[in-house]
């Protein structure tokens, strides 16, 4: 996308992606029609989650592709498990265990490494951004 859609606004790409997905799924609607009409709360939730959650996520994702590149932009997908844990604990009363904490730490470490982080030989972490050249 960075090569072929350079100069296209991220909001346009996100809107086109969601429109294409809706059009591709439209033929399946008659086969998945519910037996009862959904309530207004269900329809409102669908609109908020679809347009709000997914739409905003696509917008952020395509903006990141344009700004930092596709390789590093994909790392944002790794934050989903963190939100899932928070929602589960706060909204569903699920327990937060040591295994959950360890799993989140592994996800954070992997995300950091995937974004270009590294560990020096002395064991101290540092970024891969090169230091400024010294004057000779």
Image: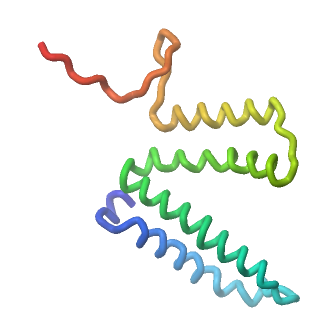
Location of residue 12 with respect to 94 vertically, above or below: below
Q: Position of residue 119 (x, y in %)?
A: 49, 20
| Residue occupying image coordinates x 53% and y 34% | 112
Question: Image height check: is 53 above or below 117?
Answer: below
Q: Quadrant of the C terminus?
A: top left
Q: Nearer the viewer, residue 54 or 120?
A: 54
Q: Quadrant of residue 9?
A: bottom left
Horizontal relation, residue 45 to residue 114: left or right? right
Q: Position of residue 127 (x, y in %)?
A: 42, 27
Residue at far top of view: 122
Residue 45 position in % (x across, y down):
72, 74
**Relative vertical location of residue 93 with respect to residue 102 in this rendering, above or below:** below
- Chosen colour scheme: rainbow
Residue 126 at x, y percent in the picture: 44, 22
Name which residue lies at 49% across and 57% down.
Answer: 61
Residue in view at x 36 percent, y 52 percent: 67
Left or right, residue 81 beside residue 129 = right
Vertical comparison of 5 with 88: above or below:
below
Residue depicted at 64% across the width and 80% down the height: 25
Image mark count: 0
């Amino acid at each position: 996308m960075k090569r072929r859609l350079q100069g296209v606004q991220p909001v346009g790409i996100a809107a086109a992606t969601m429109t294409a997905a809706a059009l591709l799924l439209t033929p399946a609607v008659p086969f998945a029609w519910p037996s009862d009409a959904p309530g207004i709360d269900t329809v409102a939730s669908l609109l908020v989650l679809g347009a709000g959650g997914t739409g905003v996520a696509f917008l952020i994702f395509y903006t990141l592709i344009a700004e930092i590149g596709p390789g590093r932009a994909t790392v944002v997908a790794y934050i989903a498990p963190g939100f899932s844990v928070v929602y589960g604990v706060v909204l569903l009363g699920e327990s937060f265990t040591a295994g959950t904490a360890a799993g989140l730490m592994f996800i954070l470490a992997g995300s950091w490494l995937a974004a270009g982080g590294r560990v020096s030989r002395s064991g101290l972490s540092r970024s891969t951004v090169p230091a400024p050249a010294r004057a000779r």
